[in-house]
Every structure is written in structure tokens, then in C-alpha cells.
Image: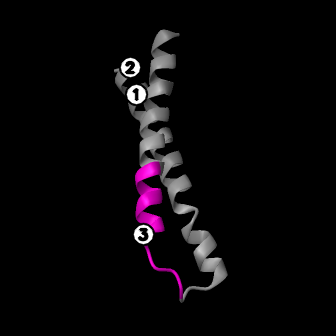
Amino acid sequence: MTNTVINALIAGLLGAIAISVTQKIVTSEDTTGWSSSTSSMFGLIPTVVGIVVIVGMFVLLTQIRSA
């Protein structure tokens, strides 16, 4: 039980860091000539990166624990 909580905290922390860093990169891009759909899809990148990091950490930590 404790391992699960620690794994969730680690995955959440790394996901939050990934979202923050990716948001800084995304907001620094010049999107003045882009269409509204492209701009809105581009804004979803930080969320997708964070989700991938969190899921990846859960998978990795689960495999480490079961090995």
C-alpha cells in the first residue's frame, strides 16, 4: 500500500514538472499566423506530455516492483 502511494506521488510530481516545462516551451512559440484549430491543438501538448509521463512512470514502477 505504501509503495503504491509513493509511486503515485512520484508519477504525479514528474507529470507536473513535464507539464510545466512543456507549457513554457509552447507559450514561447509564435503562433500569430496559425489557424485557431492548430493553435488549440498545440495548446493540448503539455497535457498529453504530462499524461504520458504519469502513465509511463506507473508502468515502469510496476515492472520494477514485480521484478
Q: Is residue 10 left or right of residue 38?
A: left
Which residue is at a point 62% across and 85% down the rendered structure image?
Answer: 35
Q: Nearer the viewer, residue 34 or 58?
A: 34
Q: Is residue 33 visible?
A: yes
Total count of labels:
3
Q: Where does the image place residue 15, in percent across and percent down from the top left?
A: 47, 41
Looking at the image, the residue that sits furthest to the bottom is 33
Q: Is residue 37 above or below residue 55?
A: below
Mark 3 or 2, which is nearer the eye? 3
- How has the structure been colored for display? one colour
* Residue type at numbered disc 3: Ser
Residue pointed to by mark 1: 61
* Mark 2–mark 1 CB contact (< 8 Å): yes
Residue 56 shows up from this direction: no
For the point 40% across and 28% down, the residue is 61
- From the top left corner, tell me how far across and down residue 45 is, in percent: 52, 61
Question: Which residue in the protein does label 3 denote?
Answer: 28
Closer mark to the observer between disc 1 and disc 3: 3
- The furthest residue to the top: 1
- Marks 2 and 1, how far apart in space? 6 Å
Instruction: Give the distance between the C-alpha atoms of the residues marked 1 and 3, in whole angstroms.
Output: 33 Å
67 is higher (above) or lower (below) than 19: above
Mark 1 vs 3, N-terminal side = 3
Q: Quadrant of residue 28?
A: bottom left
Real-space Cα separation, disc 3 to disc 2, in angstroms: 39 Å
Give the structural element (helix, strand or loop) at label 3. Answer: loop
The residue at which mark 2 appears reads as: 65
> Magenta stretch mostly in which secondary structure?
helix
Question: Is 26 a magenta residue?
Answer: yes
Which region is colored magenta? 20-32
Q: Is residue 64 left or right of residue 52?
A: left
